[in-house]
Amino acid sequence: MSNSANANALSTEEMERFQKLSNEFEPDVKGPAVSVKQSSHNIALEYANADPTLAAKTSALALTHPTTRVMRGDGNCGWRAVIFGYFEILFNLRDPHRVQAESQRIKNLNGLLDRVGHQQDIYEIFVDETMDIFTQTLTAIQNGVHDESFLVEALCNENQSNAVITHFRLLTSAWMRLNPQDYQAFLSLPVDQYCSTRIETVRTEIDEVGLQALVVGIIKDAGFGVEILYLDRSEGDAVTPHPLTTATPAGATIRLLYRPGHYDLLYRPEVEVNINPMVNYQYGMTTNYAPWDQGAAHNFEISPQMMAIPNLMADPAFAMGPDPMSPMSSVSPAPASPYQPSPTHEMYPTPIQSHAPVPAVPSIPAPSPPAVQSSAPKPMMSLPSRTSDGPQIRMNPFAMKASLNRALPVTTPFKNSPYNQAHFQNQDFEPIHWEPSDSRR
Amino acid sequence: MSSQKRIAKEFAELSASPPDGISVELADEANIYEWKVCIDGPEGSPYQNGKFLVKLNMPTEYPFKPPTISFKTKIYHPNVTNDDKGSMCLGMLRADEWKPSSKITAVLQFARQLLEEPMPDDAVEGRIAEQYNNDRKRYEEVAREWTRRFAMADHFHNTARVKEVQFN
């Protein structure tokens, strides 16, 4: 009896201690609130040793969505991803009138806040910071700035980021309180309580219902699309897309990568290429390109063995021009490589995709029968046709034929390049192997 | 800084029309982040007739982080630590339940409400909570006695202690 009483007393004390620890617990989150754009190949590397489904899905993802932006997992990642994506699209559309219209539209949403009883002197400091980002966006467009790093800075600035996120949280909460019939059925607690404990708090992660409300109530009217790509262990060899808006216009759709409890941003290839015409800067080339030279294609021997090298094409460092302001940002997997400044960077296999039959790549799971018929792995089918896109032609090796011919043989470096993961000098060296179920390291 | 602007606004509002049983002043005119709050013990509670000096500290990240409350007057209460910090941290005051749209007036009213109705399930002083649950009468006696000793007019004892704590 006394024993059990003692045990209870002890456990009460212990419980108190744990409660205190729990109350004071601050997760040790690292990294910037919003990262620079980086290769989605990093995600594939994270899962290389994981469940084969995840490994396959992330490998495919690196092809369909070559770049990503990582959000810090501090409880606001979902909010920050949507808000950053929203401003980034607005910036990339480069239409001053649209920025002004959006700024006005968001400001008018103050009406929602008034209707649910928020006082203006409380919410105006949040709204002001959002308006400041609109102003910065407008100024950047008017000054011909093409680099979105000011947006990254704005959302990495703790005060501004907190204020803007709070603003969007309050708007979302007001929207839900004013339209409870649309949300109540999906909630286990009353809408009001849900809003005050899950939406308006400082660092409660957004859930699906909240995200739906944010998109439908606040983002959708901008004419932007929002799509979630679920990365989980469900069947299939690609992440599961789930559009939150009826339309997902190219170049104006926020794409979120969802892993349980965390959101990041994803980008499809055409977005970067189309909106970033400064790609050629890094090559120091003129804009006076020679037209597509069919003759060059004959010199460029397409070797099936080469195409069978896993991760060669999966490495978006080849497919995407790095950001002109931080030339190495998209090749971060091998930052220390002494080979980076080398002209081999110009070696670039993309055009092969559009006119060469590509055998199945071992690290990517066998494509479904129809894909086999068309003799290309499934993920590549979803890539846009390269030959029809103007700016992309600049980045193919043929346009650089003259300099390449002087410096390098055209075909062999692919296999021998340290950029190739199958090359022993590559930082992320992985030998080629043939059994997908084998451990990769 | 936006936090200063907002705190100044809230302070002006609270000074002009303070809620029942609560009065505020700045601990130091030059520092808007630290307030001295006087909470009257609610009627009908064992803290009745007591005047509790509470220090309210606003973090520089306010309103994105909650203010912190510490009782400078000793108080016998399950939700206030029985040490020289006298801190109260629960409900809306916790960092993960804090809402940037909450106002300080709500925080102070919440604190006063807690004197009237302790929340033993979220106690920081387990033994007081246990007593509150199992021997309410004894709890009230002790709380009343502490109120008489530390929070009532024979201030000398009381304010002396407060000073000492403040300069610690």
Image (cartoon, rainbow, N blue to C red):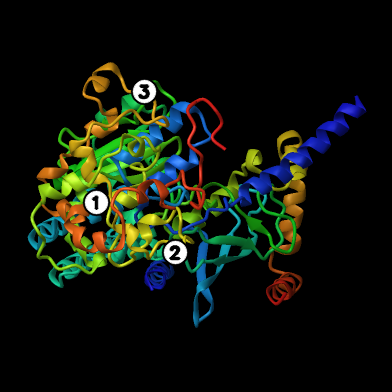
**What is the x, y in percent for residue A254?**
25, 44
Left or right of A278? Residue B39 is right
Q: Tell which of A427 and A63 is nearer to you.
A: A427
Q: Which mark is residue B18?
A: 2
Q: The C terminus of chain A appears in which quarter of the rendering?
A: top right
Q: Tell which of A50 and A155 is nearer to you.
A: A50
Q: Tell which of A29 and A10 is nearer to you.
A: A29
**What is the x, y in percent for residue A157?**
39, 65
**What is the x, y in percent for residue A387?**
13, 44
Quarter holding residue A159 = bottom left
Question: Badge 3 local density, few (<14 within 10 Å), some, or many (20+)?
Answer: some
Instruction: Tell me the residue that label 3 is attached to.
Output: A366
| Discs 1 and 2 share one subunit | no
What is the C-alpha distance between the residues marked 2 and 3? 71 Å
- What chain letter is assigned to the residue under label 1? A
Instruction: Tell me the residue that label 1 is attached to.
Output: A86
